[in-house]
Amino acid sequence: MARVRLRLGNWNRLNRKWEHRVSMMKTMVTQLLEKERIRTTLAKAKTLQRYADKVITLGKKGTRDAWIQARGIIRTDRELHKLFTQIALRYRERPGGFTRLVRAGWRERDAAPVAFIELVDRPGELRPARPPLPHIEPLSVRAWMQAQLGQTPRQPSPLLPPVVQQYLRDENRLRGPDAVASLGDGR
């Protein structure tokens, strides 16, 4: 099996050597895919969240190269198959944010902060997923100002200097009513 280098960058190093940290993250990603919710320390969960999202993105790609990369990370064939079938289908429309971090208090013996990390949009999740944000059509600055001031497109904005207001009135008069309507659209 090829050695896969886990590039953590500025991530938390978790007070472990590189080999141990990589091995631990591979095992935790495999466990997360198997159980879909695991309980661990907050620092490990934050690192795992970033790494698990990248692995799920590989599953969504569904290419041979993505399969080879994921095979170097995921430890069991069953979870690898689950990633490219069930999980990839579940998240095919979701652009990102496949995992959720829920803080769960402190561990008794050493008071380390503990958290649950789980896959979203699954049965039995700790907190339901938020609905997607509605798509808002972009407005031009002029159309937004007119909506805020309650003006029709035929009036120049009172925020403009008087010379500019007069110029716009004259231009609109020369071009006709079609030009006035196009100014309100922000085109």
Image (cartoon, rainbow, N blue to C red):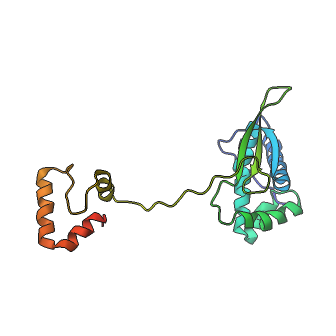
68 or 39: nearer the eye? Answer: 39
Q: Tell me the quadrant of the picture where the C terminus can be found.
A: bottom left
130 or 12: nearer the eye? Answer: 130
Asked if one can make out residue 86 in the rendered structure from this viewpoint, the answer is: yes
**How many numbered callouts?**
0
Q: What percent of the width, then of the height, locates residue 45?
A: 75, 42
Q: Residue 103 appears in which quarter of the rendering?
A: top right
Q: Tell me the quadrant of the picture where the N terminus can be found.
A: bottom right
Q: Is residue 172 left or right of residue 135?
A: left
Residue occupying the point 15% across, 61% down: 168
124 or 26: nearer the eye? Answer: 124
46 or 26: nearer the eye? Answer: 46
Q: Is residue 40 left or right of residue 12?
A: right
Relative to residue 171, is residue 99 depicted above or below? Answer: above
Asked if one can make out residue 7 in the rendered structure from this viewpoint, the answer is: no
Q: Residue 178 appears in which quarter of the rendering?
A: bottom left
Q: What percent of the width, then of the height, locates residue 90?
A: 73, 64
Q: Residue 105 appears in which quarter of the rendering?
A: top right
Residue occupying the point 73% across, 41% down: 102
Q: What percent of the width, then of the height, locates residue 100?
A: 71, 48
